[in-house]
C-alpha cells in the first residue's frame, strides 16, 4: 500500500461501529423477549434504542462531517427473516437504502451478519446450541449476499463469538442464561462452523470480498509477575480467549477484526470460576464509567500477538463508556498512537473503527453507559456531537494529510 504521513497507509479506514439491536429500535428478537424478564439494569428495555432505524441518514451525515471513511453496522437477522424461510422484502430494501446512503457519502460499509441477537424462532429451536442453526445462518447469509452483496466488500460473519458463548452459556449473564461448560463448548464449535460457511458463501458470490470476524481480544497478564499460578492463569486465558478461536478460523479470515477493550491483570483465587477470571484492579489507570481501566499499550501487545497469523488487521471496535466525555479524546489519541507505532514495526493495520458512533443500548447494562462519539438524548432522540468526536476528526485529518 502507498503510504503517507510517515506511517499511515493512504487508504487506511477511519470510522466508527454500531450494531442493529443496540441502535435501531423496535426490534423483536430473543433479546427483546429476555428484556421483558427485567434482567437489564434499571429494568430497561431496548425499545426505541437510539432511533437509528429511521435516523440513519442524519447519523451518517454527521459521520461524514467528522471525516469517517468506513462505517461498521450490523444487519438484524430477525428483521430479515421474521419467520422460518420467510424473508421480509421491506427489511431488505431498508438495508439497501442504508448501504446506498453510505456509498453516496463515500463511506465504505462494513457489514456484520450476526451481532448477539437471534430471531425468536431460531432461539426456540435451541439457538446456537443446535447444529441446525449453522445451516439456518447459512440460508440467511446467502439471502443477504444475493440481495445486498453488490454494495458490500467488507463483511464480518460473527461478532465476538467467544464473548457470546461464555456470557450466555457459561456465566449465565445474557439470554438464555445457561451455565453449562459443555453447552458453551458446543456453541463455540457451532460458531466456528457457521463462520466457515459464511466465508464460503460470501466468497462464492464475490471472490474479491474481504471477510473477517470481530474478535474480542484481551491483554491478559499475571497480576503478580513471579507467581506461578497467576502466570498459568494468564497463559490459559490468552490461549482460551484469544488464541483458540483464531487458530480455528484464521485461514478463513481475509482480515482479522480486533475489538479491544480489556487489559486484565489476573490473580489466581480458589473461589469459583467467575472470581477466578475477575481481573485485579490496577492503581493509577483511568477508568471508564463501567470501571474498565484504560491501557492503550495492550492494543500494541495484541498487534504483536496477531503477527503470527499473517493477516491484515482492522480494529473493528475500541471505545469506552464516558458520559462526561472526559477521557475519550485522550483514549482515541493514545490508541491511535499504538496503531502508528505498530505500523512502524511493520504490522499490517488497515483501519480503526471507534465504538461507537452513537450512544446505544449496552446489553445487560442498558442505556446508562455512554459509548457514543455522538450523544443521544433518549427522551427526544436528539443528537449532539461530543467534543472528543472533533478531536477524532482532527486526528483523522492529520493522519490523512
Ligand atoms: O457494546 C458492545 C458491543 O456490542 C460488542 N463489543 C463490546 C461493546 C462494548 O461493550
Image: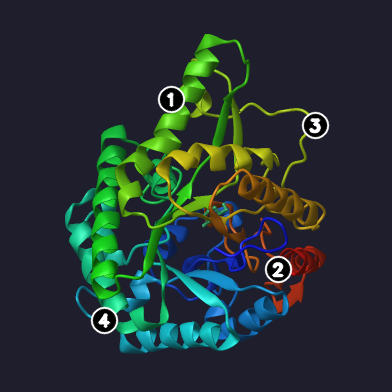
Q: Taking the image as four quarters, which one is ligand 1 found in? A: bottom right
Badge 2 marks a residue whose secondary structure is helix
* Mark in front: 4 vs 2: 2
**Residue to which mark 3 is pinned:** 284
Q: Find residue 304 and report its image quarter.
A: top right
The nearer-to-camera label among 1 and 4 is: 1
Numbered label attached to residue 400: 2
Sequence order check: which comes first, mark 1 or mark 4?
A: 4
Question: Mark 3 or mark 2, which is nearer the start of the sequence?
Answer: 3
Marks 4/2 in contact by CB < 8 Å: the verdict is no
Question: From the Cβ of disc 4, is ligand 1 less than 8 Å away?
Answer: no
Residue 236, numbered label: 1
How far apart are labels 4 and 3 at the CA level?
Answer: 52 Å
Label 3 element class:
loop
Q: Residue at x 42, y 61 (%)?
A: 115
Could you tell me if residue 81 is visible in this image?
A: no
Amino acid at each position: 500500500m502507498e503510504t503517507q504521513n510517515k506511517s499511515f497507509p493512504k487508504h487506511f479506514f477511519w470510522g466508527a461501529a454500531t450494531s442493529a439491536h443496540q441502535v435501531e429500535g423496535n426490534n423483536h428478537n430473543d433479546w427483546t423477549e429476555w428484556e421483558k424478564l427485567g434482567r437489564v439494569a434499571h429494568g430497561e428495555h431496548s425499545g426505541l434504542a437510539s432511533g437509528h432505524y429511521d435516523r440513519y441518514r442524519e447519523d451518517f451525515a454527521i459521520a461524514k462531517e467528522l471525516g469517517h471513511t468506513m462505517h461498521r453496522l450490523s444487519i438484524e437477522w430477525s428483521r430479515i427473516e421474521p419467520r422460518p424461510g420467510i424473508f421480509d422484502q421491506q427489511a431488505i430494501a431498508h438495508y439497501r437504502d442504508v448501504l446506498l446512503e453510505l456509498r453516496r457519502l463515500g463511506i465504505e460499509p462494513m457489514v456484520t451478519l450476526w451481532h448477539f441477537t437471534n430471531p425468536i424462532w431460531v432461539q426456540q429451536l435451541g439457538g446456537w446450541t443446535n447444529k441446525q442453526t449453522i445451516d439456518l445462518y447459512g440460508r440467511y447469509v446467502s439471502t443477504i449476499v444475493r440481495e445486498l452483496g453488490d454494495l458490500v466488500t467488507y463483511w464480518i460473519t460473527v461478532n465476538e463469538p467467544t464473548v457470546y458463548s461464555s456470557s450466555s452459556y457459561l456465566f449465565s449473564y445474557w439470554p438464555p442464561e445457561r451455565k453449562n461448560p459443555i453447552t458453551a463448548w458446543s456453541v463455540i464449535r457451532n460458531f466456528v462452523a457457521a463462520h466457515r460457511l459464511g466465508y464460503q458463501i460470501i466468497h462464492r458470490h464475490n471472490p474479491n470480498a474481504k471477510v473477517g470476524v470481530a474478535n474480542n481480544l484481551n491483554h491478559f497478564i499475571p497480576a503478580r509477575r513471579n507467581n506461578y499460578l497467576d502466570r498459568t492463569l494468564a497463559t490459559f486465558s490468552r490461549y482460551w480467549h484469544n488464541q483458540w478461536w483464531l487458530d480455528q478460523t484464521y485461514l478463513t479470515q481475509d482480515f482479522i477484526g480486533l475489538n479491544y477493550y480489556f487489559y486484565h491483570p489476573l490473580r489466581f483465587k480458589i473461589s469459583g470460576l467467575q472470581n477466578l477470571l475477575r481481573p485485579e484492579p490496577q492503581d493509577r489507570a483511568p477508568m471508564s464509567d463501567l470501571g474498565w481501566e484504560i491501557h492503550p499499550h495492550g492494543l500494541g501487545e495484541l498487534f504483536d500477538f496477531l503477527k503470527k497469523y499473517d493477516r491484515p488487521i482492522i480494529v473493528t471496535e475500541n471505545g469506552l463508556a464516558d458520559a462526561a466525555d472526559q477521557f475519550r479524546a485522550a483514549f482515541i489519541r493514545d490508541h491511535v498512537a499504538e496503531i502508528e507505532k505498530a505500523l512502524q514495526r511493520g504490522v499490517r493495520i488497515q483501519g480503526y473503527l471507534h465504538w461507537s458512533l452513537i450512544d446505544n443500548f449496552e446489553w445487560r447494562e442498558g442505556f446508562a453507559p455512554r459509548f457514543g462519539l455522538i450523544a443521544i438524548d433518549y427522551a427526544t432522540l436528539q443528537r449532539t456531537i461530543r467534543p472528543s468526536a472533533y478531536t477524532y476528526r482532527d486526528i483523522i485529518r492529520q493522519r490523512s494529510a
